[in-house]
Image: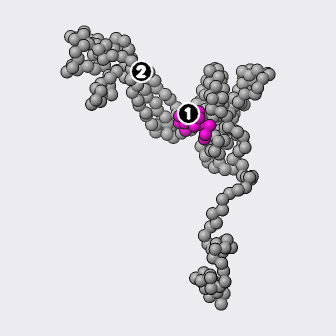
Amino acid sequence: MRQNAFWELAENPVRMGIDIASIAYYHACMRGDDQQPDSMFSYVSPEQRVPKNHPLRAIRQLVDEILRELSRDFDRLYATVGRPSIPPERLLRAQLLQIFYSIRSERLLMEQLDYNILFRWFVGLAMDDPIWNPTVFTKNRDRLLNQDLARDFLRRVVDRAAAYMSDDHFTVDGTLIEAWASQKRFQRTDGGPDRGGRNFHGESRTNDTHASTTDPDSNPGGARPTTGSRQNRKGRAWRGTRSRSGESICGGTI
């Protein structure tokens, strides 16, 4: 009898005296309720939200160990009076995030820190902590990176994170930067016949036989149907895909 009443209610709720426009009717259905969150407090900390096996957990642990070792050295960089600066520990952690995730600007990094719980947890910001102005962050960061202490910190991170890196998989990115050198100054160096660098059409010109007299580090390349070959400098950057972090930047001829 109860089963028949249930199906009759599901098929024709109006006949059973139920207002289908009421909220109670929708709550009785199996469809979930799309209530907009309006609570002011959260009882789940960022530490609980970050998965236990997330790769940043291991990095955060070794980074904190290095920062504790350098704490006394950081004290010597700051005055005893004045306006408090951004903590150097947070500056360096944020800098690591920018490297790991290839964030192209400090403004975008601050945007991520504003709403990305993972980033807030790694840097050490609470959920209610305000983020920094991008200009203020950049000035404080650059002032710190100009110190030998920051370079020592980055070297220690690379050394201790060697266990999380691998040479088996890597990604290479190459680019050509146009050099400030004229094609007419790209002349022979092997002693062969030269046309003075003026009329070089139809002439085979390679890096083995020619070099620029104004910019010896530049090389011809990047030929296009509309512009032809130009003098360029090569830049190469590679990063380990297993390590999830940029490991080396090779300047090439830059």
Q: Quadrant of the C terminus?
A: top left
The local crowd at label 2, few if under 14, some if 14 to 19, many if 20 or more residues have their Cα within 10 Å, is few
The image position of residue 180, as x and y in percent, is 39, 18
Residue drawn 33% across and 16% down? Answer: 182
Which of the 4 quarters of the picture holds residue 233? top left
Residues in magenta, as a range: 100-112
Give me the residue at 32% from left, 23% from top.
230
The kind of secondary structure element at disc 2 is loop
Say which label, 1 or 2, has the lower sequence index.
Answer: 1
Q: Main secondary structure of the magenta part?
A: helix
**Amino acid tagged 1:** Ser
Q: Position of residue 192 (x, y in %)?
A: 22, 11
Q: Which mark is residue 253?
A: 2
- Please name the residue that numbered disc 1 is placed on: 105
Residue 245 visible to an observer of this rendering: no
> Which residue is the extreme one toward the bottom?
1
Residue 7 place in picture, x, y as percent: 60, 84
Could you tell me which residue is drawn at 46 percent across and 32 percent down? 238
